[in-house]
Amino acid sequence: MRYNFSSDFLRVTPPDTTFGDAWESLCHTLLLAEFPTTHFQRIHAPDGGVDIHAPKIPRAYQCKACERGALGTADPASASASLTAALSGRATLPWDEYHLATNAAFTASGLSKIKETLVPHSMPDDCLTFLGPEYWHALCLRHGEVVEDRFYYRVTLEELQVIEALKQARYFDSFIADARQKLKDAPITLRITCNRIHLEFCLPFSTELTIEHLVDVCQSVYGIQLDWVSFTDLSTSVGPSVSMTRGNTSIPFKKKIGELVTEADNHFEFWITVVWKDGTKKDSVSGDTVMSMMTYDLAMPSTVARMTLQERRNLTISRYEEYVQTMMWQNTYAQKTRNG
């Protein structure tokens, strides 16, 4: 499971009034959970370049939020300005470590620009730490119970989007026309969750359509491709298998929706099983395509030679899961943007 820290999914709840406040509040909550014996104090404006202060360590945190989350880029100019203010105010808010807490990554040139801020103050580079979305995602996984009410992972779709999803599944025009009529004649609203992502869709459907049709729609709205991916550095390949479940039980594709649910009991889970193979697979997506969307490094041949079969399996599946979840968030962002 991956958390999304964009303004589309992170709630702004009182006393926070802006998305930036909400991000700072989330970081503060996670730090308290991760380091329960450390006192963390939120510093209110004017903050002097420090949003969260741990005086006993001493350590300072500056929280910077990009509205697009990990799909965007952190602003180095704003971070440099905050660091400059924090360096000037160390007598008032002392710190030996300065952590930039961001929900998006900096570019390489952005990182260099921020580090240059330290030079006039004769501060070493190792006093500065970049805590990006992967760090906060890991903390959310460890402390999910303290942040679960801070996210709103539900997207409501319109009928047109469901019809477009069926078109993408390459049904004939005659079926599309029939499905459109069934959505009008036997409507039902379904609630769909997925075992691979913290994300729920509410979508209009029909009791006269089948589980197979629902799976096809879910593949489209979640952005799941059934293509396998080969990682040549690991000599492995991996791909998904999809189904629809209720109560952890897989449902036959030919079952009609109306045989299974009512308007008051309308929940299905879109289930993605990840399957791996020892060896690359023909007609698969290259791992280079996956790598361009992620941050992992190729494994050195000497490293792979020392890996057990289980270690190569775990690394293969881990890479693929990150890739799939990244694709799902990007697709969902597009769905929300389309809805306005």
Image (cartoon, grey):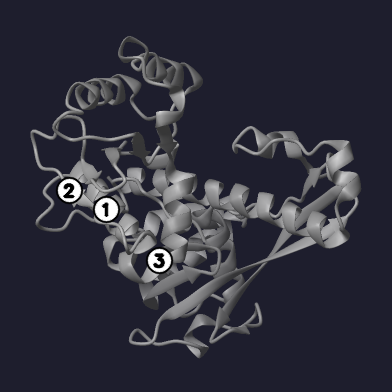
Near-viewer residue (145 or 118): 118
Q: Residue at x 24, y 56 (%)?
A: 39
- Residue 42's label in the rendered image is 2
Task: Look at the image and tell me in which quarter the C terminus lies.
Answer: top left
Q: Earlier in the sequence, mark 3 or mark 1?
A: 1
Q: Secondary structure at mark 1?
A: helix
The image shows a total of numbered marks equal to: 3
Res 277 visible: yes
Q: Left of 177 or right of it: where is 202?
A: left
Q: Amino acid at mark 3?
A: His
Q: Left of 326 or right of it: where is 317?
A: right
Res 281 visible: no
Q: Earlier in the sequence, mark 1 or mark 2?
A: 1
Label 3, label 1: how far apart the Cα atoms are: 13 Å
Near-viewer residue (203 or 281): 281
Residue with the mark numbered 1: 28
Q: In the rendered image of this protein, does residue 282 appear above or below residue 12?
A: above
Q: Secondary structure at mark 3?
A: loop
Please report contact status of discs 1 and 2: CB closer than 8 Å, yes or no: yes
Label 1, label 2: how far apart the Cα atoms are: 7 Å
